[in-house]
Image (cartoon, helix red, strand yellow):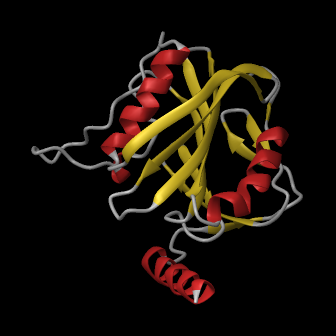
Amino acid sequence: MMKRCLGMFLAANLLLTGCVGYTLVKGGQKLELGQGLSVKPPRDWNRRTDGKHKVWTLDGPRLQYILFVKGIEDGGRIFSAKASRRGASGKDTLPKFRKGMNLLEVGELFVASLARRGAQKIITAGFAPAEFGGKDGFRFTFTYRTMAGLNMRGIAAGALLGDKLFMVIYNGTEEFFFDRSKGDFEKILASLTFGPGS
């Protein structure tokens, strides 16, 4: 019964999201993401570009995704403005990155950005320094609940380099999809490199 429900949910998600705008990322090959970043995924993923962001998914972004935030500058956003809940005026209300932010402020920006996308009961943990593509960076975990009642888990890693914010964010449903692709995410993150001069 559980497998049947999961299959129906997956089918419904794929119908809702379709594959519009997605292209195939070939596993085992080095891929340039822009802004000096490159990764080598262990298997095929589906990819779409959303402004300065790249979104990868295996089963649809409502179930799991990896978001590559490639060097947003002062006034940029961690998430696409298209995905935010609009204010009463109809304008985008996502908080913006400001140059000079410290790591604590980046964490607060991330939480505020998730909340503006409708996330509830957001909890972050384990915020600590970590290597990011050979640079000094940070890493933390997070959980939240969607407005539809799904419990989500995630990992965020990144670095502040030259007044720009780089991040790689992995997010998936607590039941099944987060664990299913976590190993892939860790391999992709470990393969991340910055090109010369970055």
The quarter of the picture where the N terminus appears is bottom right
Choose between 118 and 160: the one closer to the eye.
118
Q: Residue at x 78, y 55 (%)?
A: 184
Which one is in front, 116 or 144?
A: 144
Q: Residue at x 51, y 45 (%)?
A: 143
Q: Is residue 95 left or right of residue 188?
A: left
Q: Is residue 3 left or right of residue 187?
A: left
Tell me if residue 139 comes above or below residue 46 in the rendering: above
Give the residue at the far right of this rendering.
28
Task: Measuring from the top left, give residue 179's x and y in whole percent.
Answer: 70, 59
Taking depth in this image into account, of 187 and 35 the one nearest to the observer is: 187
**Residue 176 sits above or below residue 187 on the image:** below
Q: Position of residue 137 (x, y in %)?
A: 69, 21
In percent of the image, x 32 and y 58: which residue is there?
Answer: 147
In the picture, which quadrant includes the C terminus? top right
Q: Against 21, is 171 above or below?
A: above
Picture coordinates of residue 23, whole percent (x, y): 64, 68
Q: Quadrant location of residue 167?
A: top right
21 to the left or right of 57:
left
The single residue placed furthest to the left in the displayed view is 89
x and y, in percent, of residue 127 in the image = 61, 24
Q: Quadrant of residue 75?
A: top left
